[in-house]
Structure formats: structure tokens, C-alpha cells
Amino acid sequence: MRNVAIIGIGYTPVFVSKRRDVCIPEMISEAVENAFQNSGLTPADIEAVIFGNMQTFEGVNLPHLWAADYIASLGKPVMRVATGGTTGMSAFHAAYYHIASGLHDVVMVVTYEKHSEGDAQVGLMGIITPEIMAMLAAGIDVTGQKGMGAIGGGSAGGISYQASSYLHHSGAGIEHIDAVAAMERRNAAKNPYAHLKDPEATAEKIAQTPLISWPIRFGHVCPTTDGATVCILASEEKAAKLADKAAWVWAVANCASDATTGNLIEGIITDPGEQRPATIAAKQAYERAGIEDPRKEIDYVEIYNGFAHQTLMFLERIGMCEVGEAHKLLEKGELEMSGRLPVNASGGVVSTNAIGTSALNRVTECALQIMGQAGEHQVEKEVHKALAHGWGGLMQYVTITILADKPKKL
Amino acid sequence: MEETRQVQGTWDLSTFKFRIEGEGINNMLKEMKEAKLLGNRCHQCGTVYLPANFYCRKCHIAIHEPAEISDHGEVMSYTVGYADVRGNPLDEPRVSLMVKLDGSDTWIMGAGEEMKPEDVHIGMRVKIKWAEHRVGNLQDMESFIPE
């Protein structure tokens, strides 16, 4: 295996709910252009392209081929990856494998979502239909007329069981979900590439938004966003030639469970809040990165939190604190940008969710923090090692990436 | 700035022919006419599946050992719905439960009735309220009510 570095990052100039001024390939090309400008590279430097986008969300089939000329991929190897909410990070992992294996030296990851040209709810049917089938197998009536018809609707429906279970097992309260959502909206206000920004957000303000499905309220839920993200990776040898600053990949890992509302591990349905794949993938990533105590060694974390309680829940699942501790860290201010363990200084997925990019943005935001290039949302402490987490699939797939400021000793 | 154009369309799910794990759910539905629940136990590890799953996901082997399941169980997680699928507020909040029935290792979901949202909690004991006239579909299980 060879060392791999991130040497270039590009974003669309804004992440907003409707980009009516550009079509899909045009919007993607903005992020590609931005990555070339930031890195000083040219399309001739790129050997292969990995493309990530949710399947069916815009009703566009094969967008990676549609946009071939706009992503500087003409005459080059192209691969599309789609793993649900984790798409962006899975695409990043694919690029990592291309380089670590020795096959290529410089690979570009391109991810996007343009929700305003589609219907995420229709797209979610592609996910939710097999999900409903799995629920049906466990005894549920999909007609929703009466009796066993108990689907909450969309992923918010499934997620409220998760949040409810998390509160029960952690001892946290709905007020902690309000507080974490407010913290991330305030962080987002400092990130030019965030969507929902509120510098004045407070837990009290979030608590005034209507309940959708207890304990999830409107203020806890991610938006649907238009935007694209690009990340350029290189081998150690090429990075030395091409880049002044880089963030180094120390470990990648992923883990899937089955498609029930909980996770069926070893034949037993576990709690929807248990998220065993997160624990398993994180453990593997720590081993691969040679990290013995993540609580001491990881300086910064980006959590994939489509819903606000997940910031707290996944910190516990990936071993950054004990179960029941995350909301105490929040109360002490340790998760703030100025705190001991800053989390989601970017504003997280709960503030910006162009789904195909969301998991890649967790990685690129960790890279910016490591390189000291996060601008106004740069955290106060020095970041030597950072962890990016992705979550999605149906509800049961987790990706982890660990980055550092130096190449790993091989 | 010119507005993009919208083309209205629908995605007709009846176009697709989904196959639902048939035999297990059919066995269950047949028994439900008698207000009974029938699952399947793995002869190797003892895991009980409801509806009957003829393949043990833990041992990765075929299994065929019928197991009777109680219609009483424990609330494992729950939510209270305040809005419908389209986001419109509901007249009455709707309690929805994930329940592990006694004798089964899998969980089923269903509506909670005869309980106030503020009284529902994880670990609460509930039982199935069976429909008076059962026809062998999932709506034979009307709801969960307190035990």
C-alpha cells in the first residue's frame, strides 16, 4: 500500500436550495474549476475520475456520463459510485484504493446533488421501497390506513425511533438535540459553503419549531441542497511535486448491516440507535491508523448528521466518548469550535445536505481543518488527526476516514 | 436570470412487481385468522424469526421449525407522529411502537392505542388488539394496547 494525500478541494460558490441559473453539468463544472484554481493543477494532471451522486434523486440516469466533458474526464477512466448518504465518502475511498494500490497517481473525486431539479421524496422511494419491504417482512401494513399502518414517512419516520431510543439509552433529553442543532447552525453561519445559517441560533429558538415525529422537530432536520464538491488525491511522490500543503489519509473503513429499521447483526434485530456498523468500522479504522486511544489522538471530528441527535449518538458509537457522555460534553461546551473536541465546525449535514456531496464534505472539511484553511470556521486548537464519518445506505451503512497532517509511516 | 422549466410527472409503483418473502408471511397471515402468531426457530442457534424466515441470518443455513409467538410483548422504541407524510399536522398525535413479542427475537411495528403519548415509554408492556373479524391480512392486528 502507498500513502495517499488530498492535494486539492473545490466547492460550488454557494450551497443553496435552488440553483436555477445553472444546469447540472454547469453546476458540477464550477466545483471542478474551483478545485483546479485552488490546487494549481490542470485537467492534464488528472489520471482518473471517480463520480459520486445519489441514484434517482434528480431523475437523471448516468449523470457521470452526461457530464463527462464538464468534469474533465474525456478519454480517461471513469467510475461511478452510489451508496446512499455515504456516496461521497465511498467515492473518496474508491479514489484512495486507485492510488494506494499503485494503479494511478492522481485521481479526482467529483460529487454533486441538485435537489431542486428532482424530488428527493420520489428518490427516497428507491431507498424506502426495499426498506418498506423489509418492514413488511416484520409485520407492517404499508397502506397506512389503520392498525398496523405505522410508518412515519420518509427517513424522518425511521429516524424518530432511533432518536427516541438514543434518548432513552443515553439519558440525554430533547433539549440536548435542540442545543446541538443550534450549535451547528451557528457554526454554519461562519462557513461560506453552508446552506442553513443562523448566527443567532439558540436551543430555545430550535425548541419553538414544530414537532414532526417525537422527539424530532423541524429544527433538527437537514435541508435539501444544490451543490457540488471536488477532491483531488495524489500518491506521496506526486503530492511532493504538486502540492504545498496536503492532508494525508491514514485509514479508510466501512461496514454494512441489513436493511431492517434496526440493524440485524448476527440474526438478532438490534436497536435502531445501536448502529453497530459505526462501532465496527471505527474500530477497524483505528487499528489501520495505529490509533490506540481515539479520545486522546483524534483532534477533530465531522459526523454525518442528517438529523441533529446523530451528532451526539455517533460520537458515542465511534468511541469518542462513553455512551451517555456526549450530551455532557455538549453542556460543557467541549464540542464547540473553541472546545476540547470540536465537532462539525462546518455546520454538519443538518445545515447543508446536497446528499451526494455530504459524506465527501465530511472528509474535505477535516482536510481543511488539518491544513489550516477553514477560514472563519477554523477551530481554535491545532488539528493533527481528524475523523470523518459517513452514514446512510438504507439506514445501516457507515464509512470512516482518518486524516492526518503527516504521511503515515509505512 | 431565467427560471428553469418544470415537467410534471409521476412514478407509478404499480409498474414494478416486487416479490415479498412469500411463504413466511403467508404462513403468518393464515394463522392470524385464528389470532395466533407463527414464526420459525433456527435449530442450530435458537433464534426465532417472525414472520417465519426460512434461512437463519446468523448461521446462514436453511431452517424449518415452527415456533408459536405470544401476542404480548415489550416496547423497544417508539415515536409520536405530529405530521402526516406530506407534512400536514395531524388532528390527533399518533403513537407508533416497535415491539419485541415474547418468544420472538425480531421486532414488529404498529400503532399504539389506548395510551397517552406522554405515558408511552421504552420497556412498557403491551399486547396486540386483534380485529373482531379477521380475514388473514396484516390489519388483523389492529394495534398495540397496554397489557
Image (cartoon, coloured by chain):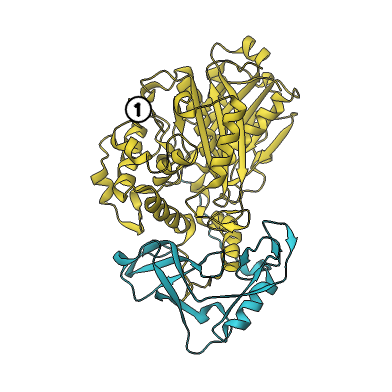
Chain colours: A yellow, B cyan
Q: Where is residue B15 in the image (x, y as percent from the top left)?
A: 66, 67
Q: Where is residue A333 in the image (x, y as percent from the top left)?
A: 30, 32
Residue A307 left/right relative to A24? left
Q: Position of residue A335 (x, y in %)?
A: 36, 32
Mark 1 belongs to which amino acid? Met
- Is the C terminus of chain A in the top left, top right, bottom left or bottom right quadrant? top right
Instruction: State whether residue A256 is above or below residue A294.
Output: below
Q: Nearer the viewer, residue B54 or A207?
A: B54
Element assignment for label 1: loop
Q: Residue at x 60, y 69 (%)?
A: B50
Q: Nearer the viewer, residue A169 or A183?
A: A169
Q: Residue at x 30, y 56 (%)?
A: A210
Res. B1 visible in picture: no
Instruction: State whether residue A5 is above or below residue A129.
Output: above
Residue B132 left/right relative to A123? left
> Alpha-carbon neighbours of circle 1 within 10 Å: few (<14), some, or many (≥20)?
many
Instruction: State whether residue A241 is above or below residue A234.
Output: above
Q: Which residue is drawn at 37% across and 64% down?
A: B81
Q: Mark 1 lies on which chain?
A: A
Q: Which of B97 and A234 is in front in this view?
A: B97
Residue furthest bottom as drawn: B133
Q: Which of A336 and A86 is in front in this view?
A: A336
